[in-house]
Image (tube, rainbow, N blue to C red):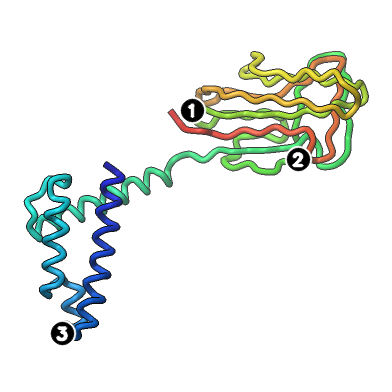
Amino acid sequence: MEAVCVLLLLLFCCNLSGAEVESSNKGNVTNESSQHFDDKVGNDWMKELMESLGEAAGTTGSQSDVYTVLRELIAKVENLEKAGNERPKVAFSASLFPSSQHRGPFNIDTTLIFTNVITNIGQAYNSGTGVFAAPVRGVYYFTFTCNSGTTGKVNAALLKNGQNMAVVIEKGNVDSMGSNSVILQLNEGDHVNIILWRGNSIYDNGYRSTFTGVLLFPM
């Protein structure tokens, strides 16, 4: 229905423009009359438009019906635009450090705090704790990348409310990298964060080890 509304509005505007140009070229109507569709050209294209789209619009083809339909369509388009503007916007991306640094190994599993915030629309990611808190119920996409540090291995996990949802296990050489992604359905207030498992290390220079998330759509 939305596509039909937009198409009708576009066709209306295009025909309006064409009618004004034709009447101007003929020199037999004033600007005021063309703007109000009082000339014969305006009435002809109005009738043709309504006859061709009357069935879809559910009208009889009269000029008054055209105005009624257009007013309803304009109101509907405005409501759709308003709904789109009110839709929550949530997206963040952060790297572990702003410059070259190593972290770990630790004796216990440790939350990674990605301090170098690149984007934080909606302010749902906390760069002081490393935790993302869902501001609305919805479906979210997360991805994280880890660069191994001095131990030559980096084992990390993405947690939802403390439960493993996705892991990176990279046991190569120093500076080897691994990444993983997941789509999660979250309730408002659910927490997502990355932990580095004990005995592992991680390295970042501003863009190697990152944590990113975005709201795909609310529910």
Q: Which residue is mark 2?
A: 116
Q: Could you say where residue 201 lies in the image, as x and y percent from the top left?
A: 86, 23
C-alpha span from label 2 to label 1 = 26 Å
Residue 1, horizontal then vertical, whole percent: 26, 41
Mark 1 residue crowding within 10 angstroms, few (<14) / some (14–19) / many (20+): some
Is residue 67 in sight in this rendering? no
Picture quarter with the C terminus: top left
| 173 up-or-down from 73: above or below | above
Under mark 2, the amino acid is: Asn
Disc number for residue 138: 1
Residue 39, above or below 197 = below
- Give the mark nearest the N terminus, 2 or 3: 3
Q: Amino acid at mark 1?
A: Gly
Residue at which label 3 appears:
28
Query: Distance from label 2 to label 3 (Cα)?
Result: 67 Å
- Determine whether 120 is above or below 43 in the image: above
Q: Residue at x 16, y 58 (%)?
A: 49
First-in-chain label (1 vs 3):
3
Q: Which is closer to the viewer, label 2 or label 3?
A: 3
Q: Is residue 17 left or right of residue 189?
A: left
Question: Please, which residue is most extreme toward the bottom here?
Answer: 27
Sequence-first tag of 2 and 1: 2
Q: What residue is at 17 percent from the left and 45 percent from the top? A: 56
Q: Quadrant of residue 2?
A: top left
In the image, 183: left or right of 48? right
